[in-house]
Amino acid sequence: MHIPVTSIKPPFFEIGPKAYLFGQDVIDLAKAADAASERYGVDIIFTTPFVDIARVRAETQHIHVLAPHMDPIRPGRGLADILPEAIVAAGAEGVMLNHCEKPLSLSVLKRTIERAREVGLSTIVCADSCAEAGMIAQLHPDIIVAEPTELVGTGVSCGPEYVEAASRAVKDVDPDILVLTAAGISNGQDVFNIILAGADATGSSSGVAKAADRAGMVDEMIGAVRRAWDKRRSHSNNG
């Protein structure tokens, strides 16, 4: 039984294979994520290529399946556009929007978030700066991904100052929005550092998809989420 994205609580993690993987490789990665989610008690968002949404949903139990984009259209004309109702029918629980590889203007983003709400899809929206994160927070998506575009895919992650600034930019507008801080996450230590710095979540695409042992890297990263979060809680309880 899948749990809705809106029920996610920190800490959580997002995996997006983008176009690095296809076919059975996507399914195998989703199954590895599913196992790690159960093993460590960490929610995982799996942003799935469109053609694999239905199969990933059918072959997993614990991960949250999201589409990587959609268009604010309604049933009717729209060849090659992504219909929100079709995403729901395929089994997605939510949609990622405004990724640096699929940017949207603020007006289109607003309409797309509204369409997502109409059909019951949760929204995870990307922002490439703290200022943009603050603006997007005014549209009240469920999750904001704060990641500097210049670090995406580089293997260089952002520091604790950015984690704190991004969280403050969002939560000063709407404290109910969860903030995922990412970009350049390539191993468990990167994950540990970001979560320990105060992020609700982090995530990885190329760091997982290009790993020699993808399942092993997923386990390493999700294990790091759990360890960092538990250390944060321990410090909080002792402080």
Image (tube, rainbow, N blue to C red):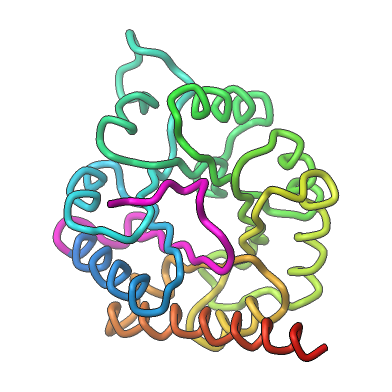
Residue sticking out furthest to the top = 76
State the image coordinates of residue 125 (x, y, percent, origin top left).
59, 45
Q: Nearer the viewer, residue 50 or 206?
A: 50
Magenta segment includes 172? no
Residue sticking out furthest to the front = 237
Magenta segment includes 6? yes
Q: Nearer the viewer, residue 62 or 148?
A: 62
| Position above or below: 68 against 190 | above
Magenta stretch, overall SS: loop
State the image coordinates of residue 67 (x, y, percent, origin top left).
38, 43
In the image, taking residue 216 as reference, residue 95 lies left or right, namely: right
State the image coordinates of residue 162 (x, y, percent, origin top left).
77, 69
In the image, taking residue 169 as reference, residue 11 lies left or right, namely: left
State the image coordinates of residue 68 (x, y, percent, origin top left).
41, 45
| Position above or below: 81 against 153 | above
Which residue is rendered at x = 79% and y = 52% of the image? 171
Which residue is rendered at x = 48% and y = 84% of the image? 187
Which residue is rendered at x = 64% and y = 60% of the image? 147
Q: Which residues are magenta?
A: 1-24
